[in-house]
Image: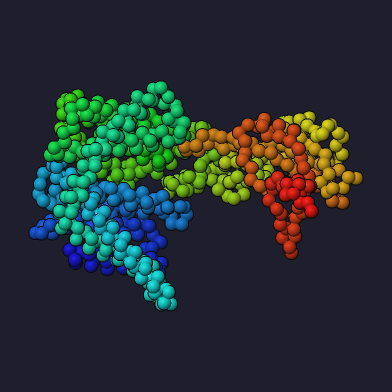
Amino acid sequence: MSGVIAGQAVLLAGLGVMLDRDLWPSDNPAVLVPTFTLTFAWPTLVLFAAAPGNFRRTAAFASACTVIAVLLGAYVGWQATPAGKFNVNAVYPIYVATMLVSGFIALGFLQQFVARERIRYSALFANAWRNLLVAGLSLALLGGVGILLALWAALFAVLGIDALAETFTEPWFILPTVGIAFGVGTMLFRRRDGLIDGIVGLLESLARYLLPVVLLIVAVFLVTLPFVSVTALWDTGLGSRILIALGAIAVLLVCIAYRPGADLRYPRPVQLSVTVVVAVLPVLSALALVGILIRVGQYGWTVSRCWAFSYAAILTLFSLGYLWGVVQHRSEWPRITAPVNVFVAGLILAVLLLQNTPVLDFRAISTKSQLARVESGEIEAAQFDFQYAERELARPGHLVAEQLVADLGFDPRDERVWGERSIPLVAEGELDIQFGGGAIVRRSPDDVPDRDFWAEMSYRPEPFVVPDGVREAIDREAYIAYRVEQPVLVQAELDGDSDRTEYLLLGVWRAEFPGSPGIPRQAWFRPLAYAIVDPGDGWEFVMLTPSNSHKPSEDPETVFEVLHSAPIPLRPRYNHVKIGDTVYALPARDWPSAEAQSSSTGDTP
């Protein structure tokens, strides 16, 4: 086994040098991902499955499993190409997680193949526990080594030996260290049968006492649900996740508590109660599936919904299997757990592997679903969630996004037209109007809304004659007709000169989010303010920017009432400060007046 660990360390050191110096294939995910998969998969499978006298058989089976993993890695790496064109932060964690879980399940079967045993649930259960605990303890050892190396590096840094301190952060050092520490931990802890068996017994005892408590929570939840309606659950936005988590905890505790050969004898009333609740567990997964499908009907498939649907479907199979055991054996239903658990474990393994293939690629499924919403006219092409596609959907999302950009003739991801910009841009004879959240409408300057802007105008403090220059300054800003609703014109002395009048144009601005996968359509409203001033060479129209944050309202009438009734103080207590070319201002707040401050502090002789 030491030779396997040493060989893996050498390969990992080579990969570290490649990453450190940006050598090929560090920039080619289609080669890099399967290379890392090969370097980690084969040695790990051998270290966990090998036993004295069967190394060759173990190596052969591990090689077959590794070939499958490498092919999956090649596909996932290809999904991350072209490199640098989109975000791949969501690709690799999912791949690593699916490979770890599928490797954990496959290892339990592999160990029985290597030992020339038929597939038995008791052996599968025992192997799974041992592998999980050995891996956990090996990771703990790896963490301890990491802490010691970090302290060592800090010591070198304090002593001024930077070259040695930086060595501990280099990929060519970190990667082989991880391999050696984890491999040594695996060799050590696989031999500690007493330690492993003691921990397993402790966890099984804990599961025995937790199972009735969790099932009681499930029962109370299901009894309460008809009185509060399922709508209240969906309104939380976490309904399906809560149901899946609750069902998963219940199923996991059932698997642990009713292990093969366990002498688990609850008192008869408790066992009957457990049986009743186990029989209704399918309700949890069914409700979760309903919630997921409702969201899919509203917003289409996404990667997270695909995973949630898979989790709920797997829980449904578990719970239906247990229900069948209750129907057949009543309180002796745990007899059915062995075949059900083996079957579903194999199904989980298949789903995890196929998810990394074109057969069940959740990113491709989600991309097709979101594109179908555009093609069906459910949403406009400009309302397609380009950011989600670039962040979560990898190559399929990137290709569809590029296709939609070509069809639109402009790129909604461009900072000029994407994001929550409030100032429209006029360029090349076109006026681009953005209504928050990505709903973009391209119009020409002549395409003015059919509205009489001045007929809608309200005035403060009372109607007055608007000078022609002021009217012309407002009319020159074509986008005002799009942006300002319920306009209000106010006479004000903005510069403190009572002999000269300036004007404020107030209004309501509507920001509409058209909806995206998982987020419904929403609209917010906030006040807008513009000043019309004459610095000496004619009236100018100036947008006022807030100096403090203000939460938008969901009620336009509330904003309109503020514009019509709220006082408009014009003079700050403290003037702005200019240092060089930079102007500083105190943050907006209700500063007390000097008189009030004096009286409150008792400023008297």
Q: Position of residue 224 (x, y in %)?
A: 37, 25
The outermost residue toward the right is 499
Q: Would residue 441 appear left or right of 291 to someone viewing this image?
A: right
Q: Position of residue 460 (x, y in %)?
A: 80, 34
Q: Position of residue 36 (x, y in %)?
A: 31, 59
Quadrant placement of the N terminus = bottom left
The outermost residue toward the front is 605
- Where is 495 relative to 555, above or below? below
Q: Residue at x 54, y 43 (%)?
A: 407
Q: Nearer the viewer, residue 32 or 486?
A: 486
- How many numbered badges does the structure rendering display? 0
> What is the quadrant of residue 163 in the picture?
bottom left
Q: Residue at x 23, y 52 (%)?
A: 133
The outermost residue toward the top is 227
Q: Nearer the viewer, residue 50 or 278?
A: 278
> What is the quadrant of residue 580 in the picture?
bottom right
- Where is 316 relative to 47, above or below? above
Q: Is residue 133 visible?
A: yes
Q: Position of residue 329 (x, y in %)?
A: 16, 26
- Where is 318 relative to 119, above or below? above
Q: Would residue 535 appear left or right of 478 to someone viewing this image?
A: right
Color scheme of the displayed model = rainbow
Q: Would residue 303 appear left or right of 267 to someone viewing this image?
A: right
Q: Residue at x 36, y 32 (%)?
A: 288
Q: Is residue 323 visible?
A: no
Q: Would residue 123 appear left or right of 13 to someone viewing this image?
A: left
